[in-house]
Structures are given as structure tokens and as C-alpha cells.
Image (tube, rainbow, N blue to C red):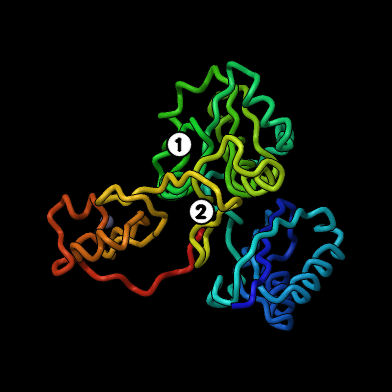
Amino acid sequence: MEVWPVILFYKYVPIADPEAFAAEQRALCLSLGLKGRVLIASEGINGTLASRPERIDNYVRRLHDDSRFRDVAIKLSHGDADTFPKLVVKVRREIVTLGVDDLKPDQHNQLVPSHWKRMLEEDPDAVVLDVRNRFESDAGKFKGAVVCEIENFRDLPGYVDRLEFLKEKKVLMYCTGGIRCEKASALLRSRGFKDVFQLHGGIVAYQEQFGNEHWEGECFVFDQRMTVRIEEDLVQIGRCAHSGRVTSRFVNCLHDPCHRLFILSEGAERENPDHRLCPECLASGLSVATADYLRPAEESDR
Ligand SMILES: [Zn+2]
């Protein structure tokens, strides 16, 4: 299948009329035949889109022509026509949902990848914190990173108490592209964490420069690809939740109310159909025969 560029971008910037702007974006994306997801809120834009190269170029040009988005960084990876099933342009309260009112995203404490990396290597008080979801760090993360046992970014405010042991450290946080860190940083500082630094541009910008240095495994992405790898030569850290086999194959738990993403090897699924349930649901006594089956997959937010 033809390789398509996949772009990832965001910016926190006031949007006066999100509905009107979403209508413009929808019309533009449709006219260019783009697929993917664009979330718009009064606080900004968060998008990931795929199409043929000339169409993506055209979109990026149009976005940069708008003075609000002249400096939007575009992160590039590769997919194909199946990376996104369709186009979704939506207005949301937040471009990435944390659910904490009156929290202004932090932009003063972002470190470019080379500075972030140097602090990681040279500062004995530095601790790396992964603010992504549990299933994302299951597939890959910076070595030695503290990970959060959360299923959704909006669970982070309730989880911060369990990060108290980092309060006197230099926290080097990261997420996929940087959008979550801007809010996570503001959240941690509002809870008394003093030394918080963000990886500007996230894992994607870091890996463009430094490949897999300090990194292990693959990078989870919120589309049909599930994970991407920057270098073919890597140590996979993803493990089947049932068998422990090495794989980065994600499935949703078949029990509808649970629906959590977990890693499942094809072998373990063949051996026992009940392995389509996550370990927690299976341990609670459910089986495929008794579980409520899944609805068609929904568009996922972070
Ligand atoms: Zn489950």
C-alpha cells in the first residue's frame, strides 16, 4: 500500500468561535480528502491527519497562513490509507481532556530535546516522569521512567498524590507530542511540585534527533497503527498480559464496560478465547460467554 505522511500538531491559542473554526477546518479537510482527527476548543487545536503528500503539504500551508498557527510545529510519521478510517472534526471543551478548571497550560518550562536529554544524563536529582496512560508505557518508554497507572489523561489529577515522592526532585516529564505535558506541568506545579520540566515536542521530536537513545520499546499512537518505531533495531518491551510473550499487539478488553487496552499475543488468543478479556476481568470470573460484547470501537481521545 502507498505510504502516506501522517502529521501530528497542536497549539494552545485562544479560538474566539470554535464552532465556526471547526466548520472551516471540516470544509478544508474534506476538500483536500484528508482523514484523521481534529479537535478544536476555545483553548486551541489538536490534530492528526493523513493523506497523499501533496494534500498534506497543502493543508500545512493553509494552516501556517493563519497568523494564529504560523508557528505550529508539524510532527511527521508514516502510515497509509488505513491509518485513519475517516475524518472527524469536533468541538470539545478541551483539546486534550484533563478536567481541571482554570488551569493555564505551562509554556515557560519546556526544554528542547537536547537540553532535556542533557539534564537526564547529568543531573543526579533528575527523575523522568511519563505522563501518558498505562497502556502507552506498556509498549515503550524512556528507560527508568516513573509511569502512571492511569487509563486516561483525565485520571491524572486523582493520581498525583501517588507521585508525592517526586516533589523534591527535578521532574523531567514527557508525553507523545507535548500537548499533555503543558497541562500536566501546570497541574503538578499547582500541587506544590517545584522543579518541573517538559520535553518540548514530546517523544516524537526527541526521537527525530536522538532515535532510541535512552528509549526502550515502541511508541504508542492513537490510530490504527497502534504503535510506531523510530528504528527497526530495538528492544521490544511490550509483553502479552496473559502469556508474557514479546509483542506489541493491542486489543480492547472484550467486556464492554471495561474496554481497556492491553497487549495480547496471537498465540495466547488462539490457546484460549477468554484471553480476549483483560487479566482483571478474567480474574473476576468473566468469560467470553458471559461478558458483554464490545460495541464498535469509538474515536478515542487521550
Ligand atoms: Zn477488562
Q: How many numbered callouts?
A: 2
* Among numbered discs 2 and 1, the one appearing first in the sequence: 1
The residue pinned by badge 2 equals 220
Q: Is residue 52 left or right of residue 139?
A: right
Judged from the image, the quadrant occupied by ligand 1 is bottom left
Q: Is residue 301 visible?
A: yes
Q: Quadrant of the rendered structure where residue 174 is?
A: top right
Q: Position of residue 181 (x, y in %)?
A: 61, 41
Rendered position, 250 above or below 151: below
Q: Dot 2: what SS?
A: strand
Rendered position, 50 above or below 163: below
Q: Going 62% across and 45% down the picture, which residue do you hit? A: 203
Q: Nearer the viewer, residue 145 or 171?
A: 145
Name the front one of labels 2 and 1. Answer: 2
Q: Residue reaching furthest front?
A: 233
Q: Position of residue 211 (x, y in %)?
A: 64, 44
The residue pinned by badge 1 equals 147
Q: Residue type at mark 2: give it.
A: Phe
Q: Going 60% across and 51% down the picture, which residue do you hit? A: 230
